[in-house]
Each structure stands twice: as C-alpha cells, then as structure tokens.
Image (cartoon, helix red, strand yellow):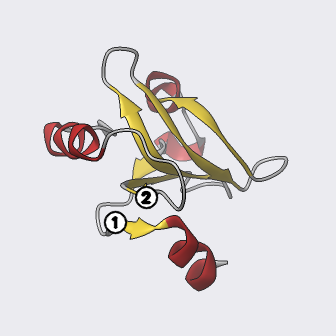
Amino acid sequence: MKLINDELTKRFKEVGRQNKNPLVIAKFFDPAGSATWYATEYDGETNICFGYVTGLAFDEWGSFSITELEAIKRPFGLTIERDIHFKEIPFNTLMNTNF
C-alpha cells in the first residue's frame, strides 16, 4: 500500500509545521505487531514524517521514513498499513481516548 497519497500530501501542506498539541493527520500501523506511527507533519521532498511512535522499545516523538515503512515486509506478505478510517484528531485528545 502506498502510505502517503495525494490527498494526504495536500493536507500535510495545508497544516504545515505544528507545535503545541499538534493535529494528527495520519495513522500507520503494523498488522502483525504492536507498532503504530501517528504523523503530524510530512516533507514530500524527503518522504519523511514527524510524529509520535508507539509500540516499539518505548514511545517517542521523532521522524520516520515513509520509504522505509513501505519497504517493511511482515509475515504472510503483510506490510505496514495506513488506517484508512482514521480521522484527524488533536494529539492530546488522541492520548486521552486511545491510551
């Protein structure tokens, strides 16, 4: 699956850089594991997102490569997926409702 489509690229450009309580624009997840990536910013030139990552060694804010996520191969032919049902949400609201 292509994780970033034209619609998301446009939306990330509209939102731009964010500081306090950023709006989470997209959610990516590992269907065969616990990792989840919540993207708040995206640079189309480098194909790098900034956001919050959970389910790995520890939860943290940081940058992650969409190119690298798209290259990950999981068991049974699974790949990292974009949650197509995810709706934009402020980060603080996300943390209060999902964790």
Taking the image as shown, residue 6 lies to the left or right of residue 48, namely left
Discs 2, 1 touching: Cβ within 8 Å: yes
Question: Residue at point 48% right, 44% down?
Answer: 80
**Amino acid at circle 2:** Val
Q: Residue placed at 64% from the left, 49% from the top?
A: 53
Earlier sequence position, callout 2 versus callout 1: 2
Crowd around label 2: few <14 · some 14–19 · many ≥20 (10 Å): many
Q: Secondary structure at mark 1?
A: loop
Q: Specify whether 12 is left or right of 21.
A: left
Q: Residue at x 59, y 32 (%)?
A: 63
Residue designated by label 2: 24
Looking at the rendered structure, the kind of residue marked 1 is Glu
**Residue ranking furthest to the bottom:** 97
Residue 42 to residue 23: above or below: above
Q: Which residue is mark 1?
A: 88
Residue at 28%, 42% in the rendered image: 12
